[in-house]
């Protein structure tokens, strides 16, 4: 199956619960799964999260860039350290900055310079970079994920919501 990234609307009450979480790891996963099923706004970019982070920032997602809205768009702002899976959140006051950064990013130029070799060298997930894959198909997936991400964040801004990021 592999690790996929989901982004979803997170209301203030659920955000507060997440910030003050101090129970068992299973409890937070149950809550996240419940929120996922009830999500008013949801984006699933499947396995393209690491390469999208790389295209946007030049580094893989294991090296998030603090204060960089392009990095935050993919991996969130604040991650829960006490859980084994990746769960992070973005508070509503960062959403407009993320949208602005995404809208001002030249995805076409970035994809013109896209290199499977650079992805392999950066050891990005998923490990497909040295296989015989359709490069144009990968570029299209990245482009679609990027555009969907902009639309998602605009919906979050309109709903005055926070964002829950899960990668598992």
Image (spheres, rainbow, N blue to C red):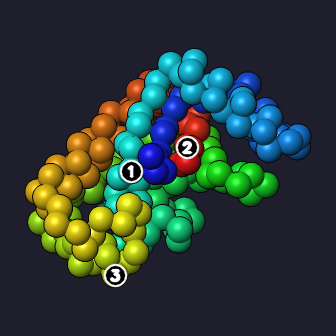
Q: Which residue is mark 1?
A: 47
Residue ID at (37%, 42%): 45
At a point 48% along the width and 50% down the height, the residue shown is 3
| Residue that badge 2 annotates | 165
Upstream in the sequence, badge 3 or badge 2? 3
Q: Is residue 78 above or below residue 31?
A: below
Q: Residue furthest bottom?
A: 121
Where does label 3 land, which residue?
121
**11 to the left or right of 3:** right
Q: Residues within 10 Å of mark 2 (few under 14, many from 20)?
A: many
Q: Position of residue 155 (x, y in %)?
A: 41, 27
**Residue 106 occupies which quadrant of the picture?**
bottom left
Is residue 87 visible in the rendered image? The answer is: yes
Cα–Cα gap, marks 1 and 3: 18 Å
Q: Which element is circle 2 on?
A: strand
Above or below, 77 against 153 in this view is below
């Amino acid at each position: 199956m592999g690790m996929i990234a989901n982004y979803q609307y997170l209301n203030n009450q659920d955000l507060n619960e997440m910030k003050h979480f101090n129970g068992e790891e299973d409890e937070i996963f149950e809550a996240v799964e419940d929120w996922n099923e009830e999500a008013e706004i949801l984006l699933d970019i499947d396995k393209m999260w690491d390469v999208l982070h790389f295209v946007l920032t030049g580094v893989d997602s294991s090296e998030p860039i603090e204060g960089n809205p392009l990095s935050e768009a993919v991996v969130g702002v604040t991650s829960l350290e006490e859980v084994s899976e990746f769960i992070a959140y973005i508070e509503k006051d960062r959403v407009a900055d993320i949208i602005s950064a995404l809208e001002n990013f030249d995805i076409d130029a970035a994809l013109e310079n896209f290199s499977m070799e650079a992805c392999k060298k950066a050891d990005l997930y998923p490990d497909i970079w040295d296989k015989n894959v359709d490069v144009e198909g990968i570029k299209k997936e990245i482009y679609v994920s990027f555009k969907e991400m902009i639309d998602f964040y605009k919906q979050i801004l309109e709903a005055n919501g926070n964002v829950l990021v899960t990668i598992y």
